[in-house]
Image (cartoon, rainbow, N blue to C red):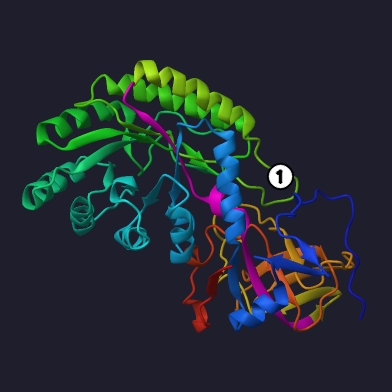
Amino acid sequence: MTPPQPASAKPTHASMAQFPVAHGELLVGGLPLARLAARVGRTPFYACDRGLLTQRVAELRAALPAGVKLHYAMKANPMPAVVGHLTGQVDGLDVASAGELQIALDAGTDPRAISFAGPGKTAAELRQAVAAGILINLESFREVGILTAASAELGLPARVAVRVNPNFELKSSGMKMSGGPKPFGVDAEAVPELLAEIGRAGLAFEGFHLFAGSQNLKADALVEAQRQCFDLAVRLAERAPAPVQCLNLGGGFGIPYFPGEQRLDLTPIGANLAILQAEAEQRLPRAELVIELGRYLVGEAGLYVCRVLDRKISRGHLFLVTDGGLHHHLSASGNFGQVIRKNYPVAIGNRMQSEPGETASVVGPLCTPLDRLADRMPLGHAEVGDLVVIFQSGAYGASASPQGFLGHPPVIEVLV
């Protein structure tokens, strides 16, 4: 049977030119994809290009004011090799668990450059954080008592900042982290009381952390949120028990995943941060401004690679059945927060010179209709044994997926 031809006049994905092509194959870290797959030993796998990670950091350094500190939010991709590569290039790491803290310390990161955020830190995790000497972003009054006891026991004053839940949100963000009732941070109106309690407890107050939202592609929305966060921090600093040394304005920088999306313009963001930095010299003279990014640093440097096991036509529609699926890449399947499922950019990685000649759905081996990596997408012709690649897969991949589901082997992760 002849599969249907691709539909036309639909919005297209942003160019995925970050991975070059030679002789019809994607190159990852300079290696042809088929050779890389042979080197890895089996599919599926994630491959992250270290050169692209380095390039992204350099692009950010060029766009942001020199004095603004750049931190990596490890939750985006806590693969130890990725963390080890980035720790020497960024100014700090943010962790979200004791497990991530251990990876950060093993990578040789200076503990004074590590911060710890999360709404449900256990007493054991908080004690570990005090012992390590890292900065703890307080997200509740409960944490003050635990840290006071740990500080007394260890003879170390806990280093703390307050994560603030503002009364505004980041417009046009993929995931809103502030505004209204939220489990994250302390409501802005309650922060003065918390600051007083920090002072009474004798904890080492260092600053504020404000994170309004994530996955935003609109520079004007990010500029507005950063301005609002800065002004709020200045007002709250009047009640702080010590001068602000660190003002973490969060991140929220997005990358293009879906048809019609365009890459974020860093120019107005850098210009706005320069203005805020100049104001901080007057209004918060001891404070360093911090931008904390996860997805934006690693997302575009990663690919998910799986192999075609079968070509199957059902009632006129072509399915490429692969050995990869939602158990490895939940977000690409659309089951990681999408309301209406949209396709990530997908290609046949060892046939990149092939024109999109057929419309196909890429599915995995799991016994559920949710196991769909691409839906009715124009692709180059693929045969059994070919390699399907999903771009924009460097963030929220393996660690954000239910790898134990249905008992299939775990995915391999490599840095190339």
For residue 290: magenta?
Answer: yes
Picture coordinates of residue 171 (x, y %)?
56, 33
Mark 1 lies on a secondary structure that is loop
Q: Residue at x 28, y 44 (%)?
A: 135
Picture coordinates of residue 411 (x, y %)?
54, 75
Q: Is residue 175 left or right of residue 165?
A: right
Q: Quick one: quadrant of the N terminus? A: bottom right
For residue 89: magenta?
Answer: no
Residue 225 visible to an observer of this rendering: yes
Give the image quarter of residue 87.
bottom left
Say which residue label 1 marks: 261
Q: Is residue 243 left or right of residue 231?
A: left
Picture coordinates of residue 110 (x, y %)?
32, 51
Range shown magenta: 285-311
Q: Is residue 213 above or below residue 228?
A: below
Instruction: Give neighbour class at mark 1: few <14, some 14-19, many 20+ (Cα, 10 Å).
Output: some
Q: Residue at x 69, y 55 (%)?
A: 342
